[in-house]
Structures are given as C-alpha cells and as structure tokens.
Image (cartoon, rainbow, N blue to C red):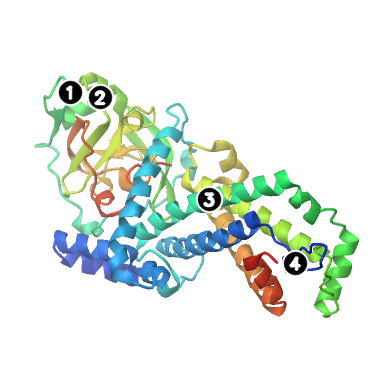
C-alpha cells in the first residue's frame, strides 16, 4: 500500500526533512491546479489554511460543552483486537521500565513532585468503555481505566485557569490540550486497558485518554506533563493537523 | 436548465442566484476533492480515489482544505436559502410540484419529447432535481457535522445512525451529488443558452 511506503520513507528521513516534505506536499496536490501558478502562491495559501485552522480551533473551543459526555458502550461492544496506531510500527513501541518510571510534573502547578507508577495506582481509579476515533476516519471501542485527570490536576494544585496542558512522551511524541478538555469528566490518566496493566503497544506505563478528542490528541507513554499559557503545539499539529482535534 | 424569462421572453437569473451558483461550484469542487483524499486515509469500501483527483497532498492538507471550504459551502448555502425564501423565488419556482406532472415530464424527457418552454418556469423534472440537490446538500452538511463532532451533536448523531454510519451517509450523499452534477451539466450543455443565462443573467 502506498500509505505504508510513504510512512516507511518518512521514518527514514530526519525530522527536519520530514517536516519540509510534509509542508511541501501539503498544498501541492490541488493548489497549482486551481491557481495555475503553483510555487509562488503555495506558501500564502498554506498560511491562509493554517489561519483558518486556528480559527477552527477557536470555534471548536466555543462549541465544546464541558458537560456533554461522549457515548459509553457495553463491554460486549469492545473492538477485538483493538487496532495499533502510531507513527512507527508495533515492534518499535518504546519500552519503559515501570519500576524506574517517574512522571514529571511542571509549569503552573503548586506541587512539582514526581509520581511513581505505584503512587498513581494508589489514587482513586475509574474505568469507562468509550469510542476512539482516528483522524483517518476509522473508529474502535475500548475500555480504559485510571485516574480522572481533573482529580489529578487538582491534587497537584494545577492552575486550572491556565490555557493548556502539554505532554512529552517516551517515543518523542508530544502534544497539548485545552484546559476545558483536561477538566472534562471522561478525561482519564489511563493506567489499564481492558482491566489489565496498559500494554506496551497501547502506551505503557500511562496515556491520556479523551473520548472527546481524536486519536492523535491522546498521547501514549507519557513521561512529563506541564501546565502553561504558551501554546505547546504537537507532533502532528505542528505539521498541519488541526490543534483542537475535538469530537 | 435554470431558466426564467422576463416579459420580452429572454431568460433571467437574478444576481444573487448566479453568484451563489458559481460560488457553490467552487465550494463543492474543493469539498469533494479534499473529501476524497480524506476518504483514502481509511476507505469505507474496497477502492480508493486516484491521488491526482484529490486535493491537499496528504491527509493533514486535505483536512485543512475541507475544513476551510466548509465555511464557504455553508455560508453560501445559507445565503442562497435566505435569498430564495425572502424573494419568494424558491416557492414560486419549485412549487407546486405534482407527482402526475413529474411522471409525464419524466417519461417525456426520456423519450426526448420534453420541450424547453420559454416561459421561465421549471418543468416538474427540474423542480424535483433542484429540490433533491438542495436536500442532498443539507444532508451532506448535517452528516458532515456528525463526522466532525459526534460528541457535541448527540441528537444529530442518533439521527445519522451513529458515527460510523454518518460516514456512510456522508459518502452516499456525495455520490448522489455527483449523480446530479453529471445530469445537470449534460442538460445545461444540451441547451447552451442556459449556461449563458447563468453567467450573464439573461
């Protein structure tokens, strides 16, 4: 499949070249067709599209109802096997040592002490069966369990009037979300999948699960999180995916 | 086959209609071409659209185009409906639509006996076709809203038969739109003065 070839080729490229490649191809397909004078206008059209994407972020923030819950499903509807999806193949998923794991917390928070896996597991846990929707269009139902993220943010004394929560991951992935979504009742600091310790391919030791956002907004293998008012961007978002990415 | 004639007998299309018509051509082209690229990222059926027929270069670019052109499509559509209702043109041109007349005109059209009258009124087949495409575009927007925001629009989500089904509705409504466009363009080219009227107004 051509998609896999492109993915494989992208992995071979250094990050800077990959960004450039993606940026170049962002508008190549259609723009020259419409303007008939390709290269000159490509950059300005791209700027306009990025600006509209930011406008769409604001519209989505306005549309987001903090009390609107995503649908939940019976366990019989769980998709088995649940699909693996990342910017690398399954056997390249990072191996994190659970014993040595220490979640870093920084930015606009009162308590910056690190969190071991045991300490996170000692917090009150909930679980829910929700639908994961990928930006590509497919969806799958899974069961995730862990700590309600709003409880965790309050416990560490986060400034919940701040705009963003950013995440850094063991696989060099990074992303960020808006505070209203961080405080949503279904946003989970996830430690288990389907009743068992979160497996490596689904983000061991910890991922953030939000049924109100598309898959690429749900970071896996989180090693650090921070609260900030400066837009932290994201791995895919910086290449052109919509930042809000909410469903 | 959009036609209206004034008293002198020449076709007349008001400015707002011509502007919204050609704006819609641009919006639909952008939406469909970028939509095909988005479809290719996770095909519902056992085929993909050729990349050369798509817009955006990759999934992220296609989404940017799709979610930019959606504003043009929606704003233009609302403006068209507002003008159509306010001027009374929609009601005047599309109604009354009688089933018996539709059948008579349809069989006449198939056998090449349907006359293109010069009285500025639509025949029953035209009325049905234009009402159909208006309804289809509304369905496209509503099913698209569910694909875009399945959590925020729970009622619409239920009406569309949940998220995965909304994608199918969105796709089928696109196919229906393509079907309309093919017939519409063929008919317009068969009576070229209708194309002139849609540009010049008469």
Residue at horizontal 81 percent and vertical 75 percent from the top: B109
Q: Position of residue A44 (x, y in %)?
A: 30, 59
Q: Assign a secondary structure to mark 2.
A: helix
Label for residue A153? Answer: 2
State which mark lies toward you, 1 or 4.
Answer: 4
Residue at horizontal 82 percent and vertical 69 percent from the top: B118
Q: Assign a secondary structure to mark 4.
A: loop
Which quadrant would the C terminus of chain A be assigned to in this image?
top left
Mark 2 — on which chain does it sit? Answer: A
State which mark lies toward you, 2 or 4.
Answer: 4
Please report contact status of discs 1 and 2: CB closer than 8 Å, yes or no: yes
Q: Assign a secondary structure to mark 1.
A: loop
Q: Which residue is mark 1?
A: A109
Please report contact status of discs 2 and 4: CB closer than 8 Å, yes or no: no
Residue at horizontal 46 percent and vertical 31 percent from the top: A69
Q: Position of residue A180 (x, y in %)?
A: 35, 29
A189 vs B157: above or below: above
In the image as oriented, which residue stretches furthest toward the front? B8
Whole-number angstrom distance, CA of label 3 to CA of label 1: 39 Å
Which quadrant would the N terminus of chain A be assigned to in this image?
bottom left
Whole-number angstrom distance, CA of label 2 to CA of label 4: 67 Å
Q: Which residue is mark 3?
A: B144
Number of marks drawn: 4
> Which of pointers 1 and 2 lies earlier in the amino acid sequence?
1
Q: Is residue B142 visible?
A: yes
Q: In the figure, residue B66 lies in which quadrant? A: bottom left
Q: Is residue A138 visible?
A: no
């Amino acid at each position: 499949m051509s998609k896999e070839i492109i993915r494989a080729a992208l992995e071979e490229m250094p990050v800077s070249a990959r960004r450039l490649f993606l940026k170049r191809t962002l508008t190549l397909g259609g723009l020259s067709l419409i303007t008939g004078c390709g290269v000159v206008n490509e950059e300005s059209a791209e700027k306009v599209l990025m600006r509209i994407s930011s406008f769409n972020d604001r519209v989505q923030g306005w549309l987001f109802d903090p009390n609107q819950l995503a649908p939940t499903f019976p366990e019989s509807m769980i998709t088995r096997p649940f699909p693996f999806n990342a910017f690398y193949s399954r056997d390249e998923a990072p191996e994190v040592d659970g014993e040595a794991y220490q979640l870093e917390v920084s930015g606009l928070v009162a308590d910056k002490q690190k969190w071991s896996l045991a300490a996170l597991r000692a917090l009150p846990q909930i679980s829910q069966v929700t639908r994961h929707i990928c930006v590509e269009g497919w969806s799958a139902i899974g069961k995730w369990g862990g700590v309600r993220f709003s409880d965790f943010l309050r416990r560490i004394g986060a400034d919940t009037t701040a705009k963003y929560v950013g995440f850094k991951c063991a696989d060099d992935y990074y992303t960020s979300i808006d505070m209203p979504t961080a405080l949503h009742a279904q946003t989970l600091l996830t430690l288990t999948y389907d009743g068992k310790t979160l497996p490596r391919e689904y983000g061991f030791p910890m991922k953030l699960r939000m049924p109100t956002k598309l898959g690429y907004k749900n970071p896996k293998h989180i090693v650090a999180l921070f609260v900030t008012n400066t837009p932290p961007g994201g791995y895919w978002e910086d290449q052109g995916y919509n930042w809000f990415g909410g469903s | 086959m959009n036609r209206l004639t004034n008293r002198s007998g020449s076709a007349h299309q008001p400015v707002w209609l011509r502007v919204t018509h050609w704006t819609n051509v641009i919006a639909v082209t952008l939406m469909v071409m970028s939509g095909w690229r988005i479809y290719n990222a996770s095909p519902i059926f056992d085929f993909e659209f050729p990349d050369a027929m798509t817009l955006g270069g990759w999934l992220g670019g296609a989404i940017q185009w799709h979610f930019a052109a959606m504003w043009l499509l929606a704003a233009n559509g609302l403006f068209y409906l507002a003008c159509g209702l306010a001027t009374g043109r929609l009601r005047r041109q599309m109604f009354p639509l009688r089933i018996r007349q539709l059948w008579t005109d349809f069989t006449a059209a198939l056998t090449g006996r349907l006359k293109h009258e010069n009285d500025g009124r639509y025949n029953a087949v035209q009325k049905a076709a234009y009402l159909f495409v208006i309804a289809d575009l509304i369905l496209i927007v509503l099913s698209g809203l569910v694909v875009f925001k399945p959590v925020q629009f729970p009622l619409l989500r239920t009406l569309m038969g949940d998220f995965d089904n909304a994608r199918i509705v969105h796709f089928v409504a696109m196919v229906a739109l393509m079907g309309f466009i093919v017939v519409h363009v063929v008919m317009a080219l068969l009576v070229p003065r209708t194309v002139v009227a849609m540009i010049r107004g008469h």
